[in-house]
Image (tube, rainbow, N blue to C red):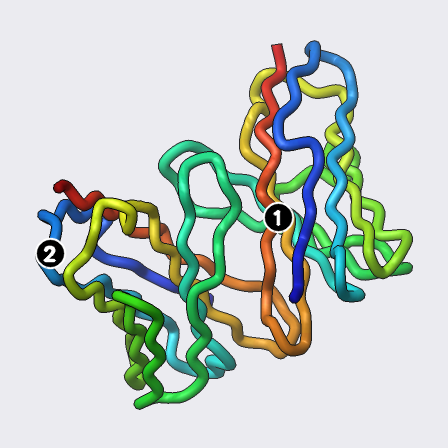
Amino acid sequence: GAVVSQHPSWVICKSGTSVKIECRSLDFQATTMFWYRQFPKQSLMLMATSNEGSKATYEQGVEKDKFLINHASLTLSTLTVTSAHPEDSSFYICSASHLNYGYTFGSGTRLTVV
Amino acid sequence: EDQVTQSPEALRLQEGESSSLNCSYTVSGLRGLFWYRQDPGKGPEFLFTLYSAGEEKEKERLKATLTKKESFLHITAPKPEDSATYLCAAIYNQGGKLIFGQGTELSVKP
């Protein structure tokens, strides 16, 4: 149990456009989801904590207007990278917390901005 | 500030050569210690959760232990398919955010 599906697995977009990444908990309800960013050879860096029905809590240094997070239902959270630039290219990973299974991670999204 | 530190950053082993990975954490207020495996281009895959000093958990060639100030991931007779980055993470508030270490990149050569 406790499967998290993340989509797309990779995306290439043009500089200045926006990209949406979806994170779904398939077999459980996730009141809290987390969004991470990971650069090559580095660990996961938490960007924000997303709670269903309320505004996301962003970590220090993360631009709220740049990385829009929506958690409209107990099974879906989305991260939208707005006006993407090459420096936003990275590996983005979501995670959902479950009472019995702890923290389950999605498979990640490789974003390349050209 | 709560911190998690992993060592070594990278570890190269020959197949069958057992070893251990270390994870040190801020002691005060720890609610749980997690180990994950991450393959290149993939999300972390859950391995173990440890909650109290003295606790041990095993899965195939892996065994995780927890003391009052650090955790170890012991790898017995590793195989090339065990090559991956192993991440340690701690949680200090129930349902709160995980704090990750930098990871240990393990390479097992045949």
Residues at marks 1 and 2 touching, judged by CB atoms closer than 8 Å: no
Q: Position of residue A60 (x, y in %)?
A: 62, 49
Indicate the quadrant where residue B100 lies.
Answer: bottom left
Name the residue type under label 1.
Gly
> Which quadrant is home to the C terminus of chain A?
top right
Q: Position of residue B56 (x, y in %)?
A: 32, 83
Q: Position of residue B81 (x, y in %)?
A: 29, 47
How many residues crowd mark 2 within 10 Å: few (<14), some (14–19), many (20+)? some
Q: In front: A79, or B3?
A: A79
Which of the numbered marks, if any, corresponds to residue B16?
A: 2
Dot 2: chain letter: B
In the image, residue B109 sits, relative to residue A27, either above or below, namely above
Indicate the quadrant where residue B107 lies.
Answer: top left
State the SS at label 2: loop
Q: Is residue A114 visible?
A: yes
User: Which residue matches tag 1?
Assistant: A106
- Residue at left offset 62%, top offset 26%: A10
Q: Using residue A41 as the reference point, say whether residue A50 is left or right of it.
A: right
Indicate the quadrant where residue A80 lies.
Answer: top right
In the image, residue A55 sits, relative to residue A66, either above or below, namely below
- Residue at left offset 26%, top offset 71%: B72
Q: Using residue B105 as the reference point, say whether residue A41 is left or right of it.
A: right
State the SS at label 1: loop
